[in-house]
Image (cartoon, helix red, strand yellow):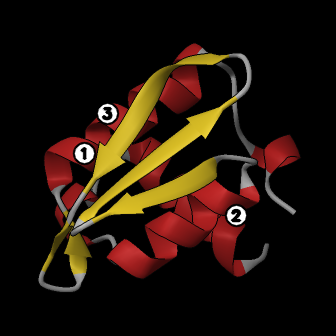
Amino acid sequence: MGKYEKLLQKILTGTSDHNIKFSELRQLLKKMGFKERIRGDRYFFTKDNVEEIINIQPQNSKAKSYQVKQIRNLIVKYSLGDSDVD
């Protein structure tokens, strides 16, 4: 199991939402096919066939826990997962 598969499993279990590195979360979203756009300290991610726009900001070097939860809900809602991560 690779680095991003482990991160995906960590996100899906929901036990470490407050302990996810922001840079790793960004890379995971890119590997899942999301397109990134940056405006100031806000990072926006979009993907075809996903209605919602993901908006995340770093908190020190970590991702905000409520945003990790929102991303987990989108992964589950749209059945994104292992097949989307290279």
**Dot 1: few (<14), some (14–19), or many (≥20) neighbours within 10 Å?**
some
Query: Compared to 80, does 78 lie above or below?
Result: above
Q: Is residue 10 left or right of residue 84?
A: left
Q: Amino acid at mark 3?
A: Gln
Label 3 residue SS: helix
Query: Compared to 78, does 63 lie above or below?
Result: below
Q: Amino acid at mark 1?
A: Gln
- Residue 48's spot in the image, x, y percent? 73, 25
Q: Is residue 76 left or right of residue 32?
A: left
Residue at label 3? 70
Mark 1 and mark 2: Cα distance apart in space: 19 Å
Q: Disc number at residue 5?
A: 2
Q: Disc number at residue 39?
A: none
Mark 2 and mark 3: Cα distance apart in space: 18 Å
Q: Amino acid at mark 2?
A: Glu
Q: Disc number at residue 67?
A: 1
- Residue 50's spot in the image, x, y percent? 61, 20
The quarter of the image holding the C terminus is bottom right
Query: Compared to 77, does 2 lie above or below?
Result: below
Q: Residue at x 31, y 33 (%)?
A: 70
Mark 1 or mark 2: whose residue is earlier in sequence: 2
Asked where in the image residue 15 lies, by quadrant, the reply is: bottom left
Mark 1 and mark 3: Cα distance apart in space: 5 Å
**Dot 3: few (<14), some (14–19), or many (≥20) neighbours within 10 Å?**
few
Asked if marks 1 and 3 touch (Cβ < 8 Å), the reply is yes
